[in-house]
Amino acid sequence: MKRLLFFIWISLVPFLCKGQSAQEYLQVVTDRNLYITGERIHVSVRVEDGSHHPLDMSKVAYVELSDTQKAHVQFMIALKDGQGWGEALLPATMHSGNYELSVYTYYMKNFGSDSFYRKNLGVVNLNFKSPEDNLVWEEGLSQISASSDYPIHTDKPVYGKRSPIRVQLPKDGQGHATLSVRRLDMEMLSEDPISKVQSYGGKASSAYLPEVEGHLLSVQPTEGVGSLARVQLGVMGLDTHVADGKKLRGDEFLFLMNGVYGHQHVALAGFDAQNNPAPVTLKSPYAQCLPAELPVLKVRYEETPLKFRLLASQLQGSVVPQRDPQQRFTVEGREPSYIYNLSEYTPMKSIREALMEFVEGIKYDKHKGSYALFTTTEEVSGYSSQPALVLLDGVPVQDIDKLMGYDARRIHYILIYRGKYTFGDNVQEGVISFTTYTGELPSYQLTENERLYEYDFPQNRPPFEAREYGNSTEVSAEQPDFRSLLYWNPQVKGDAVSFYSSDMTGVYEIKLTTFNAHGEEESFLGYFEVR
């Protein structure tokens, strides 16, 4: 942890010496410009320098969708080589109207909201009307025929339901590009999706570090708590992520969360200079920059397809994302010295009994008036004189005596890591990790000082899940397929792509988006029909 934070500061030197002249410009593409609540918004981000070359500095992009009152959607996107993508569900509580999409990096916050990428997107709530609605409806869509007069071509102009579709891409659009295929059932009449021009001007701040290694999670004391001396963090789950924060200014602690992605539970414990408990809380990394005003959303629509689109959004919204169940055995990149798989042993009622019966290399003894666990050393035979860091499902354990009484039948693995481990300013003599079968601290009560939070870490290139119908059984399946967005690919490579149509008839638009050498957006269109 200390090494990585040091690397961040070293990486900052060239930018600070230039008076923070490093500037990031964002190219952002969404799957469409008009949504209904309950659908997912898909966002692709590319970071460039002032000459429109890829810039691999920040490793996280922040996305917000806001009206003039608050941000309704917030999520992070992990960046690799200056590119990444993510998605989010549009809540059913959103009113109908225009919203502002803002995308930025943590470092860009130094230059103010004018440096952010911003554009307007429309959202329609088909479930209920709100006093905040800012929407004008008009029935009837513009007629577009599926002809060959467009730069993007399909293998045929008309398809049946649940049929394979092959798209031939234009040569000018091949390479790194974004492709979206959607049904034409709504369109903006007075469309205002044009992004505001990013500008860097005025005096810049130096409060926000560029996230050159990964997401920087900020922790601060709760209101009314005195000065903090140390904060310990653990990400709950089968994967092990534990760290001590680095104190930067005031009582803010910073954690480098490299390699942590998606929805996680985070346990925090704070301590003052006398090692007394001091409650802490997570600090939001978002800028929460709200637009001063937004134009009226004017929409032309086709009623029947929208009803099916609403049903599809309701079915989609009921899907609960699954956590990664995989067990990973590394701490700070090191493999464990010993692994005990308790499913291979006689079940014990407590961890104390399990350690006494068949686990070697762990000693349970007192240290400075309280019980602790010790591991054997690598340098000499025998046990270390300093306690090991003890984890239960990735959460640092403060009360070891309480842990000894925990039901060992819930424990899947006991992992022993020998050697010295550095977390923040603290050096631990070994790590002992207990992981349950679920990775969710079953029947374990945290102490009063430990707080458990839900936190959405950056999304790491989630795949777009499109249905496939490879045989007659799947084609005739009774489960309806009302998808209006058939395909979304934020990193198209090659000269052709393939996907399947849904049960929704009508005209579909294919849109390929690229950016030229001057950073200007270029779009290529094509159309086909499903009957």
Image (cartoon, rainbow, N blue to C red):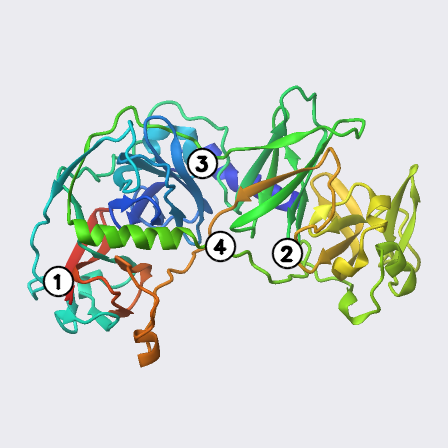
Q: Residue at x 31, y 64 (%)?
A: 480
Q: Which residue is mark 1?
A: 151
Q: Quadrant of the N terminus?
A: top right
Q: Disc 4 to disc 2, how far (Cα)?
A: 17 Å
Q: Which residue is mark 4?
A: 321
Q: Nearer the viewer, mark 4 or mark 3?
A: 4
Q: Disc 4 to disc 1, how far (Cα)?
A: 37 Å
Is residue 442 in view from this perspective?
A: yes
Q: Residue at x 29, y 28 (%)?
A: 132
Q: Disc 1 to disc 3, how far (Cα)?
A: 39 Å
Residue 508 bears which disc, if any?
Answer: none
The number of numbered badges drawn on the structure is 4
Using the rendered view, name the quadrant where residue 358 is placed.
bottom right
Q: Residue at x 80, y 55 (%)?
A: 407
Q: Nearer the viewer, mark 4 or mark 1?
A: 4
Is residue 386 in view from this perspective?
A: no
Question: Residue at the front extreme?
Answer: 478
Q: Nearer the viewer, residue 247 or 143?
A: 143
Q: Secondary structure at mark 3?
A: helix
Q: Which residue is mark 3?
A: 107
Closer to the N terminus: mark 2 or mark 1? 1
Q: Secondary structure at mark 2?
A: loop
Is 218 drawn above or below residue 335 in the view shown?
A: above
Residue 239 bears which disc, if any?
Answer: 2
Using the rendered view, name the quadrant where residue 283 is placed.
top right
Please state if 335 lies on the left or on the right of 109 as rendered: right
Is 327 drawn above or below residue 443 in the view shown?
A: below
